[in-house]
Image (spheres, rainbow, N blue to C red):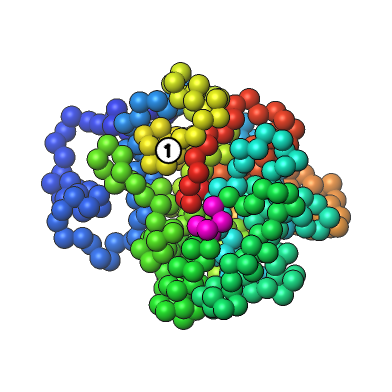
Amino acid sequence: MPSLENDSDRRGSDEADPELVELLRQHLGLGGKPNKSAPPETKVLEAAQYIFDNSIDVALSPAQVKEAAETIWRLMQKKAYSTQTWSEHELHPQEKNESTVDFIFTMDLLNFSFWSDEKDESKRFCIEYRGRKWTGYWSLVAALQRALDEGIQITTPDFWVNEAECTVEVLRHVFRSATDEEIPLFEERVQCLREAGDVLCNEFGGSFVNCIDDANYSAAGLVNLLAENFAYFRDETSFNGKKVRILKRAQILVADLWACFNGEDFGEFHDIDKITMFADYRIPQMLNQLGCLRYSPPLDSHIRSLKPLTPGSNWEIELRGTSIWCVELIKREIEKRHPEVKIASKKSVKHSGVEGKEHYEGPEEHEEKSHKTYGINAILIDFFLYDTMKDLEAEQNESVPHHRTRSIWY
């Protein structure tokens, strides 16, 4: 079995080719003339490896990573997990048009910090919609859908910048809670909408669709465009004196477009596999529960005590960066053991998911589907781990709490 050890352990003793060294230096931004014709890179994965290589309080268990990779692959096969799964969620948009693009942009612009310090679950912030109470990420989606049902143009940039119509009072109404606890970081969410509205209206013709066009079907290009033009998507920080990019919400925005549109139309990206996992607080929690991610005793005690982690602190960056690298290693391990997934990844964009549930399956058809291989990438692994962690939370089967960082980045 190939090792999951760092590639640096396998370096040969031969001298490096000077041209290759110069190309590497340019790629890492270490001098020389940049190659403007080179495909765009987000630099998130290399930042994650750097964080992992220099982590003190967060480590990985190679044995558990290998075991988790096989478990994840088998469960994703069993559940036929693919881009189609995204649209199967009750609250996600079902139509595939420009208004859906507007919805996804708004959703991921505001997709951060829903956890509550309230110990009594019945008193936590939640949104009442369609006869149910929604918490976490789903509270945001429910709030947006509810606002649209009420005739409020909450996904329209022109509305965000019109402070005479889009007042703070209107936005409080949009995010009104079914409890006394209001949505966390409300003022920051208002600023997100105002700032993004200004950028879209002044530089991109008032529509995020124009940003997608400017990225020229490149997932990495669109992530970079978001980070460069929208301050509230610029999720980067310094670690050991080096700038590192994590870009959680910019990446998940691209991933949601890809998943919603099944890799076609507004979700057609030729380099979608450059997107990494989305470093929040749920995936580290799940990776720790799987035994892949290990914490030092001080960090473990801190998290279990529900003490907050300072945004940008070493502990927080180590958790996020090492999680990204861990999911990358899980993906690589799946590809090593099941090389057929690489072929399936190319096909699954336009032939993903399971056909309608009303469709009758004969014995031969069922047999064929049971052996179908669905493509694997960091996005689908992330979605699967997140959904699984939320199921465990609902069942009260969390073995460790998630870390707590109050941040606009996740």
> Residue at image x 22%, y 52%?
29
* 347 with respect to 4 (left or right): right
Q: Secondary structure at mark 1?
A: loop
Residue at 16%, 40% (x, y): give it: 16
Horizontal side of residue 251 vs 180, given as left or right: left
Q: Give residue 321's position: percent from left, percent from top.
A: 41, 39
Residue 294 vertical placement versus 123 (above, below): above
Left-right relation of 24 to 318: left
How many circles with numbers are drawn on the protein? 1
Q: Is residue 62 above or below residue 237?
A: above
Q: Main secondary structure of the magenta part?
A: helix
Residue at horizontal 34%, vertical 61%?
A: 39
Q: Which is nearer the eye, 147 or 371?
A: 147
Q: Which residue is mark 1?
A: 310
Name which quarter of the figure residue 58 lies in.
top left
**Residue 65 colored magenta?**
no
Residue 349: x %, y % from top left: 58, 58
Whole-percent x, y for residue 268 in the image? 53, 66
- Which residue is farthest bottom? 205
Name above or below for residue 73 compared with residue 277: above
Residue 187 on the magenta segment: yes
Range drawn in magenta: 185-189
Residue 269 at least partly seen: no
